[in-house]
Image (cartoon, grey):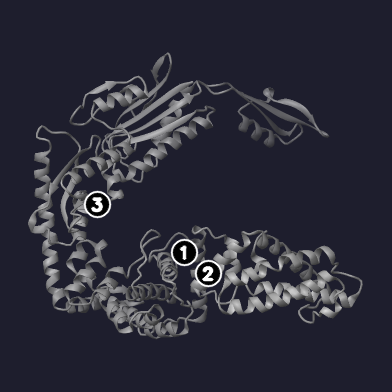
Amino acid sequence: MSDLLIELFSEEIPARMQAAARENLKKLVTDGLVEAGLTYESARAFSTPRRLVLTVQGLTPESKPVREERKGPRTDAPQAALDGFLRSTGLTLDQLEKRADKKAEVYFAVIEKPGRKAAEIIAEVLERTIRTFPWPKSMRWGSGSLRWVRPLHSILCLLGDEGGAEVVPMSVDGIVAGNTTGGHRFMAPARFAVSSFDDYTAKLRRAFVMLDSAEREAHIWNDAQNQAFARGLELVPDAGLLTEVAGLVEWPVVLMGAIGAEFLHLPPEVLQTSMREHQKFFSVRNPKSGRIEGFVTVANRETADNGATILKGNLKVLSARLSDARFFWENDLRVAKAGMGDWAEGLKAVTFHNKLGSQADRIARIAALAREIAPLVGADPDQAARAAGLAKLDLRSAMVGEFPELQGTMGRYYALEAGEPETIANAARDHYSPLGPSDAVPSEPVSVAVALADKIDTLTGFWAIDEKPTGSKDPFALRRAALGVIRLVLGNGVRWRIADIRMVHLLQQKLTENGPFKFSNEVMADLLSFFHDRLKVFLRDQGIRHDVIDACLAMPGNDDLTLLVKRAEALQAFLGSDDGTNLLQGFKRANNILTQAEQKDGVEYSFGADPKFAETDEERALFAALDAGEAAIAPAMVQEDFAAAMAAMAKLRAPIDAFFTAVQINTDNAIVRRNRLNLLHRIRALVAQVADFTKVEG
């Protein structure tokens, strides 16, 4: 067995591309090796800003010979068919064999491919990989035809075993593979030879290169935490920034600095966003005050002054950036303290959508909807409408203009400065939430009302103008809006029907002020179907079976999301029990027999089951069990006590099992047969009160 080491050494690879590049290198090379007949034990890929690396262990030294027999045309077939077969096999006529096949004689081609040395295969696979590598963006340089993310300088390609390692002979666009690589650009730029992966990693570390991105991340995080802790501060977690910074350095050196006192009054989110977006700095927080008081930067080299000069330069640039943020903040505060009227007026000139009016028009719709929704979530209607009217005003602020990701967050600060109560200010912050599956769901009633109104306006508005998601395209994030409504409703136990006539009518009135479109019953039905699709995805992620969801969606009231989920959870729990599994089988049997009889006889057996025609104790016991079940299930369904309804259904399991064991449904006695078929209908009708069991698998 042999080990393979590949390094593609280039100018700096953008950090955002490195993770995918590692996986692509591993997949393209290993897939190519396997397709060519080689096998291997394991493979790992690594990246730094200047190199992609792949190590493959336990690689077979050569591919096995292959013998393939391929059946061709009959010997008396037209010449064109024979010529095509010869072209496909690469053989000549005298190399074909004639064999008897049933009633005819046919040609057979026996193709033998000898085994190939691993080095030969590796050279072909690696060259193809480099030339077809799927970079999101690539470039050409010099006079060659090769495209790479940045100029490719060298290729290291070693194949070795216990007896030593050899360079795999290959070249790409004049770049000849070798056994050397370079160290850190500044601290150890000289090239050096390596003989194996272990030798490679050891020499890289001596040349100030940490090969593993996970190791670089851990080093940065631990060192930054330790430095913050030593000063009585704490590092603000930022996983995305950590991954990005680890992709910018080969030898991470963590440095911590303090933010100037003149900037400490800025909101923490402003400092954090400015430092992350402009400087790739981590934020350091005072746990007692919650203020951002320091920053962490990661240098790519060690210096004689332990980073003092680097910190000084970074702090100078940071101060300039934070001065801009302070300017935005102070100017915005003047508008906020004046009531934000200038921003409200400015939104009249900002188009939300050419068919849905301006941002001001949209705010008016959301405020009207929030007023209607407020009683359903326990909020004050006036406060909900007021909060909706203010929630989007920060879109006109200078700070949000510079940092759009702070919309809502800044709205809260500005609302408080304008003298609004905290519940209204919080609604301005929270009304975009939840933004994704991991985002928190607002719980304050006013915030919930405004958040629901915002998303409902978005969905119904774009449905009304027929701008719905198609395939993978969703330019207005309508899937996210629908999921947001679902999580808001379920997370707060809101009893709200999607097809609430008052809200649709209200919205229709508001929408028609801005364009000649209709929000018809057909549009409402299509929107409800879209909600159901999103709910299926959400519930499947919660572990609820797709057939259980379908069985509940088929029931009346399926536009009440809270009721729907409550029913689905109870049904899944019931079907997971022995009683549920066996009752499902009994229902399926009853439904199948009844359906077949109705189709055969051309009638519906749905009335008239009478215990006086019962001939067996099992039959009479089933009548009694169904009477008791109906008495228990009907009130439980009215009270939406699905657990009680399922418990009542569970008591039917034994009588139904006994009935089918002892009784023949299709007896020769027509009266008894009809009575028993009507009894089966009672089983079907009783179970159908809880869910559509015909959609449940099993």
Q: Estimate how packed mark 2 is, as few (under 14), some (14 to 19) or many (20 or more) residues with alpha carbons within 10 Å.
A: some
Residue 18 percent location from the top left of the image: 33, 41
| Amino acid beneath label 1 | Thr
Amino acid at circle 2: Lys
Q: Which residue has dot 1 on it?
A: 470
Question: First in sequence: mark 3 or mark 2?
Answer: 3
The answer to whether the residues at label 1 and label 2 have Cβ atoms under 8 Å apart is: no
Residue 168 visible to an observer of this rendering:
no
Which quarter of the picture shows residue 629? bottom right
Three-letter code for the amino acid on which mark 3 is drawn: Val
What residue is drawn where x is 34% and y is 66%?
Answer: 433
Which residue is at the front of the view, 274 or 516? Answer: 274
Q: Nearer the viewer, residue 645 or 47?
A: 645
- Disc 2 designates what residue? 566
SS of the residue at dot 2? helix
Residue 670 lies in what quarter of the image?
A: bottom right
Mark-to-mark CA distance, 3 and 2: 38 Å
Residue that carries the numbered disc 3 in the rendered image:
236
Q: CA distance from mark 1 to mark 2?
A: 30 Å
* Front position in the image: 505 or 385: 385
- Of the two numbered discs 1 and 2 on the same chain, state the one appearing first in sequence: 1
Marks 1, 2: nearer the viewer: 2
